[in-house]
């Protein structure tokens, strides 16, 4: 004999569910209140941190870069990097403001160190530079190559020049390829150099490097 299946009235099911929910809320109301208060407090702290600390700090860091940038434009790389006693230099701005400083300070710092012969420091700063602008990022990568060249790490320099050329395919890439080609020549790898000169001639014929490519190719062929 089959058992009869008891069907629960829909309205009764809803009422039972509501009762269960009310019991849960009543039982856990203190925990729920504390949770809501905690979420609101965290949001308020985050807003206050951003508005009253982080934002003013970033504005202050930006203001501090103006004097350093002026020294940089005048090729006073020592003052641009380390300040002049009255205003901060890029290295000091990085130490003072950290991630609140604009990303450009790492590029400036790296180029200053490059000009001053501080190649290890240049590599360190330039590797920290991050830009959404592919041309500027490629320039930073190429500058890392220059720093490695200063350290006589030729293979690493070539690697960075090639990386810069492929990072942003524009007329400036011809210059990066040219640097890599010349370094191949200096290392005695004439054929790798020739391939790069031919690539420059083919891809960037209107660039200064493209216009000079035949001269470099002819020099290799004559040797």
Image (cartoon, grey):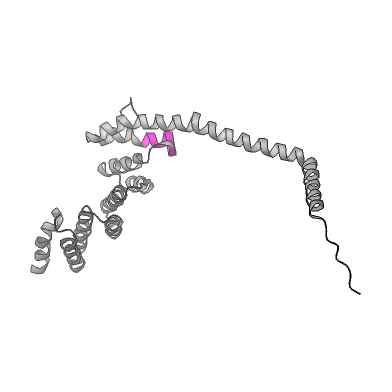
Main structural element of the magenta stretch: helix, strand or loop?
A: helix
Q: Residue at x 9, y 61 (%)?
A: 215
Q: Residue at the right extreme?
A: 1
Q: Furthest-top residue in view?
A: 86
State left or right for residue 59 relative to residue 42: left
**66 in magenta:** no
Q: Nearer the viewer, residue 29 or 161?
A: 29
Position of 2 with respect to 43 (left or right) is right
Name the quadrant containing residue 88.
Answer: top left
State whether residue 132 is above or below residue 59. Answer: below
Q: Position of residue 17 (x, y in %)?
A: 78, 50
Q: Give me the residue at 44% from left, 29% from top.
A: 56
Q: Quarter of the image containing the N terminus?
A: bottom right
Q: Residue at x 52, y 32 (%)?
A: 49
Towards the viewer: 188 or 111: 111
Indicate the position of residue 175 as horizontal and vertical percent values. 20, 54
* Residue lying at the far bottom of the rendered structure: 1
Left or right: residue 122 versus residue 76 is: right
Position of 48 relative to 150 (above/below): above
Kindly indicate the quadrant of the structure image that contains residue 189: bottom left
Is residue 145 left or right of 100 when viewed as pictured?
left
| Count of numbered tags | 0
Task: Give how far across and how far down residue 167 sits, in percent.
Answer: 31, 56
Region in magenta: 91-99
Name the spot of residue 223 as percent of width and height, x first.
9, 68
């Amino acid at each position: 004999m089959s058992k009869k299946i008891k069907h629960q009235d829909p309205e009764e099911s809803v009422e039972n569910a509501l009762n269960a929910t009310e019991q849960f809320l009543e039982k856990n109301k203190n925990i729920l209140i504390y949770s809501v208060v905690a979420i609101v407090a965290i949001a308020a702290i985050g807003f206050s941190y951003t508005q009253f600390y982080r934002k003013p700090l970033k504005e202050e860091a930006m203001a501090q870069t103006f004097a350093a940038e002026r020294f940089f434009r005048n090729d006073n790389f020592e003052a641009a990097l380390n300040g002049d006693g009255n205003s901060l230099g890029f290295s000091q701005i990085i130490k003072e403001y950290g991630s609140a400083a604009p990303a450009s300070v790492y590029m400036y710092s790296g180029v200053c160190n490059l000009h001053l012969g501080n190649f290890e420091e240049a590599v360190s700063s330039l590797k920290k530079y991050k830009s959404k602008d592919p041309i500027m990022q490629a320039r930073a990568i190429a500058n890392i190559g220059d720093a490695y060249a200063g350290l006589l790490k030729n293979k690493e320099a070539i690697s960075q020049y090639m990386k810069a050329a492929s990072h942003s395919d524009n007329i400036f890439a011809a210059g990066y390829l040219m640097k890599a080609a010349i370094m191949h020549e200096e290392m005695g790898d004439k054929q790798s150099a020739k391939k790069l000169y031919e690539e420059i001639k083919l891809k960037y014929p209107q660039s200064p490097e493209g216009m000079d490519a035949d001269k470099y190719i002819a020099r290799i062929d004559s040797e």
